[in-house]
Amino acid sequence: MRGKSWNRIVVDARACTENYRFLQSLAGSVPVLAMVKADAYGHGMVYTARAFAEGGCRHFGVAELSEGVALRASGVAGQIIVSIGFAAEEASLFFDYALTPVICTPVHAAALEREAAKRDTTIDVHLKINTGMGRLGLLPEEVKDFAEAVEQYPHLRIAGAMSHFPEADTPGAASTLAALDRFQPLRQWLRQRYNAVCHIANSAALFNHPEAYCDMVRAGIALYGYHPAGEAGREMSGFADRLVPAMRFSSRILQVKEYPQGTTISYGCTFVTPKKMKIAVIPVGYEDGLDRLRSNGGVVLVGGKRVPICGRICMNMSMLDVSELSAVAVGDEVVLLGRQQDEMISADEIAAETGTISYEVLCRFGHMNNHFSE
Ligand SMILES: *Cc1c(COP(=O)(O)O)cnc(C)c1O
């Protein structure tokens, strides 16, 4: 490829496969569905879905219909569950691409019934139940009426039902127990009446709440090598090194220069060299997902050492204080996320700096860099 960027996201497919195998070993005989929404949390949806399939994964979850279409079109086999709503006039895509819709409104049920009848076929649907997340879904007391209404449609089959925990990353949280108390009786009814596959557990519940595995577990963040409760959660989990972070983000040094004391660095002149300093420039800025809040605060790796970002992070460039490094040259590798020699910067570390969670750090790096390499 000509004009290649120095900024590269590399996703370790083997780490993805091994993370999947590990999570499946925790879940035992309950299948683990891989959540690959949001371009697999920035890791590349098709690429990682193949890695999970390699580990035995046969169930995938996406948020939007367009994601499901792209995943199926890539040739991925198995079940693909589309968990958020869709425009009724696009119902035909669920049939064309063999996708499983999750529904909680009469409009969606009717649209799918119409399309199925037209094609003289049937379609499996999952119901979405709100047990405390306060997002999409039927209230527990609405489930039976809705299910019985769907039953009236000869071309729809209730094959499953899902819910989602708001707080499973806090072990023993009252909201988790309350959600399970609401879900379990419905599950019993849905299983008895429709033999429905019921699922509520995310990565956090996979680690903290075995009683919530039900008939399937939906794992997301842990597949990409992170614990839902961050670094502290990883340490407490007892399997710190079984989750292998899959994403690495690297770049290269564009320029190295020595500046005298009193030189201002970057927009706003927020950094002034307190002494003679060696400053490196990298072609990474906030457009690449390097959060501008990390100006004069973040660190990156050069030559296996942590070096500070100095001055404001620009749109496409940032400056590093490399005064402590004896040998540093144009073209040297810089690591913004992941390992370099004995040092490592994790998405949890970055998230702690900017007051967010690893999920967002990974999505942003992934989405803002289309320079993937395998
Ligand atoms: C994203 C998502 C998951 C996965 O959550 P993790 O915390 O990443 O394991 C599970 N279920 C639903 C409905 C989701 O949207």
Image (cartoon, rainbow, N blue to C red):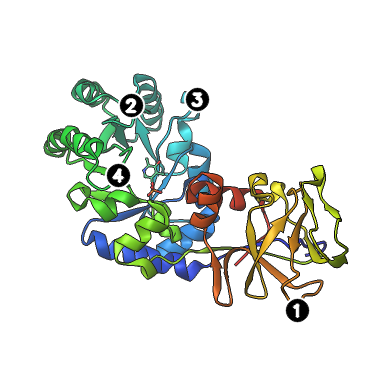
Circle 3 — which element?
helix
State whether label 1 is within 8 Å of ligand 1: no
Q: In front here: 294 or 110?
A: 294
State whether label 4 is within 8 Å of ligand 1: yes
Circle 2 — which element?
loop
Mark 4 or mark 2: which is in front? 4
* Kind of residue indicated by mark 1: Ser
Circle 4 — which element?
loop
Mark seen at residue 104: 2
Residue 44, placed above or below residue 115: below
Residue 371: quarter of image: bottom right
Tag 4 and tag 2, C-beta contact below 8 Å: no
Mark 1 or mark 3: which is in front? 1
Q: CA distance from mark 1 to mark 3?
A: 63 Å
Q: Which residue lies under the disc numbered 1?
A: 326
Return the disc, 1 or 2, that comes first in the chain's sequence. 2
Q: CA distance from mark 1 to mark 4?
A: 47 Å
Mark seen at residue 137: none
Residue 314: x and y, percent?
A: 77, 48
Residue at the spot 46% in from the left edge and 24% down from the top edge: 88
Q: Residues within 10 Å of mark 2 (few under 14, many from 20)?
A: many
Return the disc, 1 or 4, that comes first in the chain's sequence. 4
State whether label 3 is within 8 Å of ligand 1: no
Q: CA distance from mark 4 to mark 2?
A: 23 Å
* Kind of residue indicated by mark 4: Ala
Return the disc, 3 or 2, that comes first in the chain's sequence. 3
Q: CA distance from mark 3 to mark 4?
A: 36 Å
Return the disc, 4 or 2, that comes first in the chain's sequence. 2
Tag 1 and tag 2, C-beta contact below 8 Å: no
* Kind of residue indicated by mark 3: Glu
